[in-house]
Image: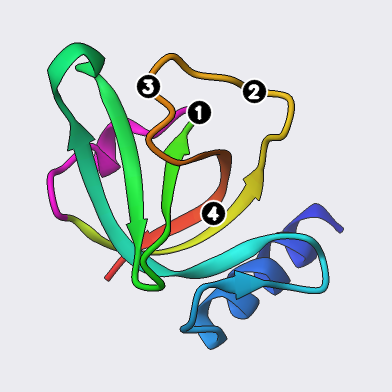
Amino acid sequence: MKRLTALALVAAVVLLTACRDSPSGLIVGTGAIQAWGGECTGIWILHADSGRNYELTSLAAGFQQQDLRVRFALKLRSDWVSVCMVGAGADVVSMTKL
């Protein structure tokens, strides 16, 4: 059942190209990974093609590449606060390299 759910999520992310809220409450779309500098070194953000920035609560090492183009599904974190606050805090649900 978990495998079927994961496949359905990946299919939804692949089919949706614009960044928007999905009926499941996930934000899906495409964008580029960016390293945030200055006093906030070590912070990774996702700059979505919609123009919005999302500060990622965690990012797998394989995706920690400047300007890496990705397709993503994110879950917003309203309970999470960062010193940098360069965008809305979000957990990565799924991400694939383009």
Residues under labels 3 and 2: Cα distance? 12 Å
Q: Residue at x 20, y 12 (%)?
A: 39
Q: Secondary structure at mark 1?
A: loop
Q: Secondary structure at mark 3?
A: loop
Which mark lies nearer to you, 1 or 3?
3
Determine whether label 2 and label 4 are within 8 Å by CB: no
Looking at marks 2 and 1 on the same chain, the residue that comes earlier in the sequence is marked by 1
Which mark lies nearer to you, 2 or 1?
2
* Residue that numbered label 1 is attached to: 57
Q: Determine which of the numbered discs, if any, sits on residue 94 in the image.
A: 4
* Residue that numbered label 2 is attached to: 80
Looking at marks 4 and 1 on the same chain, the residue that comes earlier in the sequence is marked by 1
Q: Determine which of the numbered discs, if any, sits on residue 84 in the image.
A: 3
Viewer-closest of 62 and 4: 62
Query: Where 46 falls versus 41 (above or below)?
Result: below
Q: x, y (%) of residue 91? A: 58, 38
